[in-house]
Image: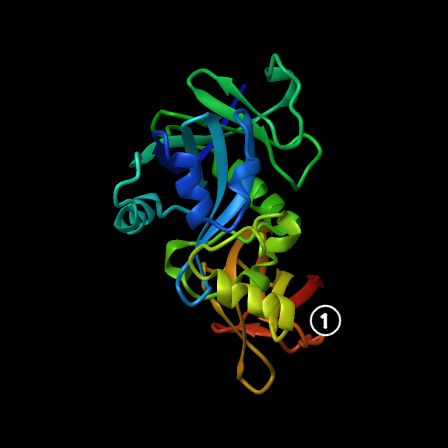
Amino acid sequence: MPMPLCPAELLTLSGADASSFAQAQFTSDVSTLTPGHWQWSAWLDAQGRARHFFLLMCVETDRLLAWLPLGGAEAMREALARYVFRAKLTLSASTDWTLHALSADELDTPLDTHAIVARADGFAFRQPGGENRIAWLAPSPAVDVDADALNRWRAADVAAGLPLLAPALGGEFVPQALDLERLDAIRFDKGCYPGQEIAARLHFRGGNKRGLRRLRVDGAAPANGTELLDAAGANAGRILYAAPVSADASEALAVMPIDQPDDAGALKTADGLGVFVITV
């Protein structure tokens, strides 16, 4: 049986110019995205910082869906609408979808890595973080969600290094700090898009000082955006999101200085929880 996890927010781009508009606004190479497939992508601000990170699906030639795992679809729609001008495009945001965990034997069609299949008016696709981790987005409000299952799902997101962005953290991090290139979520040579010049300069000339770290936290899952402190009490990064993995520990994905020692056992959250780097 599909396991309902949490509400899901989607932004729909529909119309003859949906693909060309997305190509001109988003960081990924949307020109390579064909119907029935998905890719990771982001939308940057003029300063080259990520406003939103999302999974972009091409469900039809003239219809794209952007799934924002931690929300923000309406804010993204409102901001994107300023750039539509005369494009043949309609933007709409929906907050009444539900994310489900699905098992492979519940699908009639085998799923390739970046393929999507239609299922009961929704869409199913594989996610990194487990060999058989399959997401199903269904257009119905979330009911009877399983909190424990959601915690396991988020922990798998952390393990996969997915830089999920809560709306409050939009505009905080450059693409390099979120490791978007590893996910093929950004192209620096595809042409202009908001923030492209700054992001490309940082890519080709270097100078990025922050990156993703997977952390072990001694205690309950810290809130999105929790500040990390070093032994001297100075800022040592920020947690993007976290998930409990046991009764007394959680794992988190954070943006931290790339020169931060991996064995920096003196790291703590702002409220005093011990923090240890698992992987870089």
Asked if residue 171 can be seen in this view, the reply is yes
Give the residue number, with chain letter if any, for mark 1.
262
Residue 15 at x, y = what percent?
34, 30
In the image, 49 versus 71, the foreground residue is: 49
Query: Residue 87's quadrant in the figure?
Result: top left
Indicate whether 196 appears above or below 142. below
On the rendered structure, is 261 left or right of 233? right
Q: Residues within 10 Å of mark 1 (few under 14, many from 20)?
A: some
Q: For the point 50% across and 65% down, which residue is it?
A: 197
Residue 8 at x, y = what percent?
40, 36
In the image, 17 versus 70, the foreground residue is: 17
Residue 56 at x, y = what percent?
49, 38
Indicate whether 152 appears above or below 179. above
On the rendered structure, is 200 left or right of 72? right
In the image, 151 versus 77, the foreground residue is: 77
Indicate whether 191 appears above or below 108. below
- Indicate the quadrant containing the N terminus: top left, top right, bottom left or bottom right: top right
Q: For the point 61% across and 76% down, which residue is it?
A: 207
Q: For the point 49% across and 17% down, which residue is it?
A: 119
